[in-house]
Amino acid sequence: MQLSASLSQRLSGTALIPGDKSISHRALMFGALAVGETVITGLLEGEDVHATAGALSAMGAQVHRDHDGTWRVFGVGVGGLMEPQTELAMGNSGTSTRLLLGLMATTPITATLTGDASLSKRPMARVTKPLEAMGAQFVAREGVRLPLTVTGASLPRPLTYTLPVASAQVKSAVLLAGLNAPGLTTVIEPVATRDHTERMLQAFGATISIEDREEGRVIALMGEQELAPATIQVPRDPSSAAFPVIAALITEGSKITLPGMLLNPGRIGLYETLKEMGAKIAIENERMEGGEPVGDLSVEYSPLTAVAVPPERAPSMIDEYPALFAAAALAQGRTLARGLEELRVKESDRLAVMAEGLKACGVKVEEFEDGLAIHGTGGTPVPGGATVKTHLDHRIAMAFLTLGLAAQAPVTVDDATPIETSFPGFAALMSGLGAAIKAQGE
Ligand code: S3P
C-alpha cells in the first residue's frame, strides 16, 4: 500500500497516540509469568504486540481482550510456560523476539522463532551469547539470525553480565531469564537504557535492586520468586508521538495537544533535542501513572535551528532519529548526529535508508559510518517529489510521510503497511489533525 503526503498547514486538535510499545510487550510478558489475573488498559494493539500475545498464548498463558479494549492475562507462574506446538511467528518485532528468547532460555522447552525479511536479517547473538551462559542452547541460521530454535535450560544458572552494547532488549532478555534461575542475576549497563523492565518487575512484586556505580547502572534480580499480578495502565508512546509532534513543528500555523504521554527519562531525548532546536513544546500536568512519569504535551509550529546531537543522548532517543532527520531537513543549518552505529541494525539500516530517501527528496545529506549530517532549508519546504522505499521499516514510512507535509511536491512511500506494527491508525490520526496524507490514487 502506497501513501503520499503533501504540503500542509495549520495542523490542529488533540492527538490520542496509541499505547507505548515497549511497555505493552512487557505488560503481557510479566502478566504471563505472574500467578493470577493481570489487567492491562491502553495496550498498543499493533502487529508487534500481537506477536508477543500470540507467542504467550501458544505457550499456555491465557490472553483475552474485552470488548472495551481491556486486556486480561492469566499467568502460568515463573517457569510455567509450556512448549508451543507450532513455530512462533515474530513478524517484524525485534523486541518480541529478544525478550521472549530471554523468557524461554531458562524454561525447559524447545521453540522455533521465525520473522519477516527485516527481522530475519537482524543480529540475535547479542542475546544468545549471555543466554547460553545461563544454560540455554540455540540453533540458528548463519550469523545467528532467524529462524532460530531455542532449548531452555533445565538447570538454569544465574549470570552477572556487563552489556557490550547499550541495549534495553539485551538487558531485559537477561533479566527475564534470571527470573527462573536460582540466586542473583546482575546486569551492568555502562550506559543507561530505558528502564521499563525494572519498573515493571517492581510493579509485579519482584525483589530487584538498582544502583548507580562507577562501572555504570547495576541491576540485580533475585531469581525463583513468584510474581504477583498487576493492574497496568499503558501510557501513550513518545516514539509514535514523534511524528505528529514534528509534523506540527514544521507546518506553519500548527498547534496540537497530546495528552497522557509517557515521559520516562530514558525515552525523551528527542524532545530535549527539539527544544534545543527552538521547538515550542510545553509539558503540563506531570504525574505518575502505573509507575511511569506521564504528562500532556502541547506543540506549536516553530522555526528550527540545527544542533549537534550529543552521542551520549542516543539511547534515550534511539528510535527517534528518522523523525529527527525529517525535522532537521527544515531547520536552519547543519544538524549533526553521530554515535549511531546501532541504527544500521534496526528494522532497516536507518542511516542508509534515511540518507537515500532524503537525497531523493532534494535534501543535502552527509552519511558517516555512525551518523548523518543534514543541511536544512531554514523552513522553506523541501523539494520532495520522490517515492521512497521503506524496507519493511515502520519508522522510515512515518518519517517520510511527515517530511512530505513540508515538501513542494508530494512525498510517497512505496509500502506503508509496516506502520501497523507500531502505530495503527497513523494516517487517520494525521488526517484528523489536518495533514494531507492519502492513499495513492485517492
Ligand atoms: C526496545 C529497545 C530498543 C528500541 C526498540 C524497543 C525495548 O532496542 O530500539 O524499539 O522495548 O526494549 P535496543 O535495546 O536494542 O536498542
Image: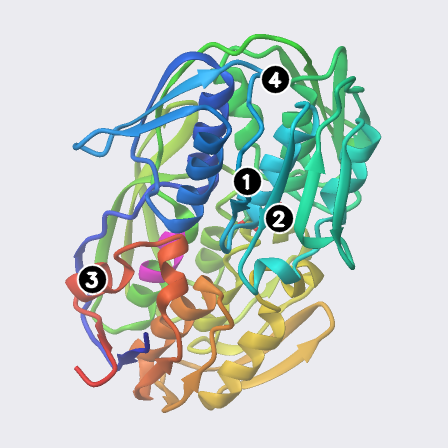
Label 3 sits on a secondary structure element that is: helix
Nearer the viewer's eye, disc 4 or disc 3?
Answer: 4
Mark 1 lies within 8 Å of ligand 1 (Cβ measured): no
Picture coordinates of residue 274, whole percent (x, y): 45, 59
Residue behind mark 1: 266
Q: Which residues are magenta?
A: 240-244
Say the numbered circle drawn on residue 315. 2
Say the numbered circle drawn on residue 428. 3
Picture coordinates of residue 288, whole percent (x, y): 37, 25
Q: Which residue type carries mark 2?
A: Pro
Nearer the viewer's eye, disc 1 or disc 4?
Answer: 4
Q: Which residue type carries mark 1?
A: Gly
Mark 2 lies within 8 Å of ligand 1 (Cβ measured): yes
Q: Nearer the viewer, residue 427 or 224?
A: 224
Identify whether 167 is placed above or below 245: above
- Is 181 left, or right, of 255 in this rendering? right
Which circle's residue, 2 or 1, is located before the other in the chain?
1
Mark 1 and 3 residues: CB-CB less than 8 Å, in contact? no
Can residue 163 be seen? no
Which circle's residue, 1 or 4, is located before the other in the chain?
4
Residue behind mark 4: 79
Q: Residues within 10 Å of mark 4 (few under 14, many from 20)?
A: many
